[in-house]
């Protein structure tokens, strides 16, 4: 959950000030990717999490909110029951969005860049159940697609070989040799990878740094990753499949480095609320 204030300076320029960020490791995908359904225990945990977020929004005086569900609920056969139960017990309305909309929102969250006539950007967001790819050129998104490859899905052995092939073909089919490609990674995993490789903020992470980190992590077990790299328990297992996905994307796009703008789905949702009046009134 991200809470932001929108500030306009004397010149009329908007600034989105991040005020509070909360991440809860629910992992609904552990149920839905395996059993195609969310269990009773997970639903109760989910409701408790939504209630806690609601109280935090109240404390911050939030007026409008958006709540989106992605791949884990997209694939759950009882998603309608889950959404209905959450609404009845918390008054929070959740919308399940498809992969294409998720990819578009993430790409819209990017910082506004100066137009570069000979450069094409590829944004990669790696989540628990899906990976979103978006091509951006001259400050405008030209193409987006969501693929069912993710970190939690990988841990449950649910990543399919044919989807890897689809990503490779899609990237190569939409690259343009007349344009220099620059790769951007978004989401919590790449932010953590930046720290773990000791890459300075604003500087790209090299392929060598990432493959070295992957090799080092693969040699040690889960507990040692937590202690040696100061990782949260819910990050120590997913960081390895995340590295693999980013590295494959770098290989297929011919990139030897990846930039980290530190934005993601929640940043795009904030902009949706402000620019598109998409938010729902928070009921106290």
Image (cartoon, rainbow, N blue to C red):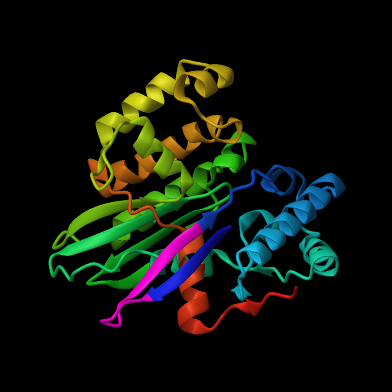
Q: Is residue 37 among what the camera can see? A: no
Residue shown at 51% from the left, 29% from the top: 231
- Report whether 118 appears left or right of 57: left
**228 or 34, nearer to the observer:** 228
- Residue 263 point in image, percent of width and height: 41, 57
Q: Please determine whether, in this image, residue 85 is positioned above or below residue 281.
A: above
- Residue 145 point in image, percent of width and height: 45, 63
Magenta-span inclusion, residue 48: no
Report the span colored magenta: 8-19
Residue shown at 45% from the left, 81% from the top: 275
On-image quarter of the C terminus: bottom right
Q: Is residue 24 among what the camera can see? A: yes
Q: Please determine whether, in this image, residue 218 is positioned above or below residue 265.
A: above
- Residue 26 point in image, percent of width and height: 68, 46
- Residue 217 point in image, percent of width and height: 44, 22
Magenta-span inclusion, residue 14: yes
Q: Quadrant of residue 109?
A: bottom left
């Amino acid at each position: 959950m991200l809470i932001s204030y929108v500030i306009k300076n004397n010149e009329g320029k908007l600034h989105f000030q991040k005020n509070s960020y909360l991440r809860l490791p629910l992992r609904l995908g552990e149920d839905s990717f395996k059993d195609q359904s969310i269990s009773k225990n997970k639903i109760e945990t989910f409701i408790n999490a939504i209630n806690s977020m609601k109280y935090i929004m109240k404390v911050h005086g939030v007026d409008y909110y958006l709540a989106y569900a992605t791949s884990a609920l997209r694939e759950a056969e009882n998603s309608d029951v889950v959404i209905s139960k959450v609404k009845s017990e918390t008054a929070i309305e959740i919308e399940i969005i498809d992969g294409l909309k998720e990819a578009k929102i993430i790409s819209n969250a990017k910082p506004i860049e100066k137009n570069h006539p000979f450069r094409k950007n590829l944004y990669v967001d790696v989540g628990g159940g899906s990976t979103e790819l978006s091509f951006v050129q001259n400050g405008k998104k030209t193409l987006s697609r969501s693929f069912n490859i993710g970190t939690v899905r990988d841990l449950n052995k649910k990543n399919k070989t044919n989807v890897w092939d689809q990503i490779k073909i899609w990237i190569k089919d939409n690259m343009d040799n007349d344009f220099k490609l620059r790769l951007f990674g978004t989401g919590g995993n790449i932010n953590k990878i930046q720290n773990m490789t000791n890459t300075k903020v604003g500087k790209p992470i090299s392929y060598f740094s990432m493959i070295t980190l992957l090799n080092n992590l693969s040699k040690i077990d889960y507990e040692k990753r937590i202690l040696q790299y100061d990782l949260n328990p819910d990050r120590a297992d997913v960081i390895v499949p995340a590295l693999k996905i980013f590295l494959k994307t770098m290989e297929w796009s011919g990139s030897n480095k990846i930039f980290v703008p530190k934005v993601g789905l929640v940043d795009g949702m904030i902009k949706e609320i402000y620019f598109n009046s998409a938010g729902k009134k928070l009921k106290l």
